[in-house]
Image (tube, rainbow, N blue to C red):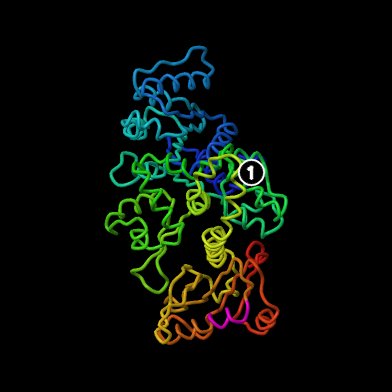
């Protein structure tokens, strides 16, 4: 199947779906498609059905009886039958569904499957039976795709002792757009502007099309007004998006606690102890909340590069970071029309330190891991982390935003590069001196470091002429500005 031109990117996802649908076997097959809301899953799967003449059914939050009526009506319409089908139960409905393919494979999509399973918990078992030996003898080459946005539920469909465990031949997660791809999607030429937009809304496609109606900041001067009219505006959907992302997850019952955890992380409390102190709770009381937020992909836990038992929690969705760092503390004023500009004006320091700064550090790690040339970082990184390097002589610690690990010829891990990232500072010789100090400490205490460990300096504000001259004469130093971050390697 040729991918429709209106679908931006998603080449990998389309190729996997096309391979799944085109499988020539006579047996029915199962695929599971998941991903956070507003990433274009429905758009993608509907295009697959249109291209291959498949059946698409979008479930809604409804009772069992109502869902069966809706399903029967949609199936009859797809088959060209004048009267809606009536099913006594989902066993009949699944049996009818698995028989709609005749001589060639037919894709069948059940979107928002968690809604159906919530009202009819027996559905996964019925589908499992239909895919089993008896069902295969009586069935047809249906290519069944179950789709959902509740990540915890979709992940459990194929886990452990779940009925569908081992039945799927496709398990596809539709992610947000990469920061470089997001720049192209928003059609922003200026990397400094693309960085700021991405720090607020990330790579979610719907935030440009449906949520802002194509409103793109014209230039850097228009960025602030764009935030005010689209994100801080109570009349626009992005205004409450930070709240709704939590409300849409069925496993998040104590939303006050989960919002509190996210606010703590957005405020710079990245350890479990730091989050506990912020919320004035015991550290042991937060285990479940942190685990659930991690399971549904709203936060991630990044091990410290130098201390295996330490880790830092980061928010993975930029709009959540922006909401908790900027909007939630000012919610009373933001809900009153006309005060958004005042809130944005007095939030500039918080935006730079709590949103833009951590975002630049995150993109620096992404660039090092996925976009940097191996020659630049002294090898192909196997993993990239951040960490705190102790400096006993000065009774301090060096925070390294980038620590790239590669594999030596003998298979052992080595530190290929270390780096520092700044969002607002013009980086100069003093920053390089700190990195050289950190490399010296590593050489003294960590056998994975070598004199060839590269020094990477990232800056969204540029570099001093003196540092640029020094870097030109040294093979172990690389300066990465915004152009290199978005276009270079």
- Which is the main secondary structure of the residues drawn in magenta? helix
Q: Is residue 262 above or below residue 487?
A: above
**In this rendering, position of residue 271 left or right of residue 334:** left
Q: Is residue 221 above or below residue 84?
A: below
Residue at the top extreme of this rendering? 83
Q: Is residue 261 above or below residue 485?
A: above
Give the x, y percent position of residue 23. Answer: 50, 40
- The quarter of the picture where residue 14 lies is top right
Quadrant showing the N terminus? top right
Frontmost residue, 49 versus 221: 221
Give the x, y percent position of residue 465. Answer: 70, 79
Question: Which residue is at 58% across, 47% downward?
Answer: 10
- The quarter of the picture where residue 445 lies is bottom left
Give the x, y percent position of residue 378. Answer: 55, 77
Q: Is residue 448 above or below residue 369?
A: below
Count of picture labels? 1
- The quarter of the picture where residue 428 lies is bottom right
Highlighted range, magenta: 428-435
Quadrant showing the C terminus? bottom right
Q: Within 10 angstroms of label 1, few (less than 14), some, or many (20 or more) residues?
A: some
Question: Which residue is at 60% across, 75% downward?
Answer: 375
Q: Which residue is mark 1?
A: 229
Q: What secondary structure is found at the residue carrying circle 1?
A: helix
Question: Which residue is at 56% across, 66% downward?
Answer: 364
Give the x, y percent position of residue 223. Answer: 66, 52
């Amino acid at each position: 199947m040729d991918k429709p031109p209106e679908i931006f990117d998603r080449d990998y996802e389309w190729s996997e779906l096309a391979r799944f649908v085109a499988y020539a076997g006579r047996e029915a097959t199962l695929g599971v498609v998941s991903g956070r809301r507003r990433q274009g899953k429905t758009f993608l799967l509907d295009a697959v059905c249109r291209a291959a003449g498949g059946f698409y059914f979008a479930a809604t939050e409804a009772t069992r009886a109502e869902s069966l009526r809706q399903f029967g009506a949609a199936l009859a319409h797809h088959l060209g039958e004048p009267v809606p089908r009536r099913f006594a139960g989902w066993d009949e409905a699944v049996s009818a569904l698995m028989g709609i393919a005749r001589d060639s494979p037919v894709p069948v999509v059940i979107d928002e499957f968690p809604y159906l399973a919530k009202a009819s918990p027996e559905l996964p078992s019925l589908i499992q039976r239909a895919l089993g030996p008896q069902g295969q003898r009586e069935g047809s080459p249906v290519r069944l795709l179950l789709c959902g946005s509740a990540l915890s539920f979709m992940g459990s469909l194929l886990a452990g002792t779940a009925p569908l465990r081992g039945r799927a031949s496709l398990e596809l997660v539709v992610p947000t757009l990469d920061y470089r791809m997001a720049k192209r999607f928003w059609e922003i030429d200026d990397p400094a502007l693309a960085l700021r937009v991405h720090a607020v809304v990330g790579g979610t496609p719907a935030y440009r099309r449906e949520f802002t109606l194509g409103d793109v900041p014209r230039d850097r001067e228009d960025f602030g007004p764009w935030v005010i009219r689209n994100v801080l505006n109570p009349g626009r959907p992005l205004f409450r998006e930070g709240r709704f992302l939590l409300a849409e997850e069925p496993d998040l019952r104590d939303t006050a606690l989960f919002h509190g955890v996210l606010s703590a992380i957005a405020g710079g409390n990245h350890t479990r102890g730091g989050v506990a102190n912020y919320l004035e709770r015991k550290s042991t009381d937060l285990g479940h909340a942190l685990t659930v937020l991690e399971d549904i992909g709203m936060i991630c836990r990044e091990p410290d590069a130098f201390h295996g038992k330490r880790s830092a929690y980061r928010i993975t969705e930029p709009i959540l970071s922006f909401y908790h760092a900027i909007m939630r503390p000012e919610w009373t004023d933001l809900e009153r029309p006309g005060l958004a500009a005042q809130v944005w004006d007095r939030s500039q320091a918080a935006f730079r330190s709590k949103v833009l700064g951590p975002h630049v550090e995150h993109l620096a790690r992404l660039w090092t891991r996925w976009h940097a040339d191996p020659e630049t970082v002294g090898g192909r990184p196997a993993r990239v982390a951040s960490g705190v390097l102790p400096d006993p002589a000065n009774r301090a610690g060096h925070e390294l935003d980038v620590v790239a690990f590669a594999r030596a010829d003998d298979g052992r891990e080595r530190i290929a590069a270390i780096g520092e990232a700044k969002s607002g500072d013009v980086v100069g010789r003093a920053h390089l001196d700190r990195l050289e100090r950190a490399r010296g400490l590593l050489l003294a205490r960590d056998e994975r470091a070598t004199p060839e460990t590269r020094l990477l300096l990232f800056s969204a504000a540029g570099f001093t002429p003196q540092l640029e001259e020094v870097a030109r004469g040294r093979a172990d130093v690389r300066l990465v500005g915004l152009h290199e971050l978005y276009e270079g390697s």
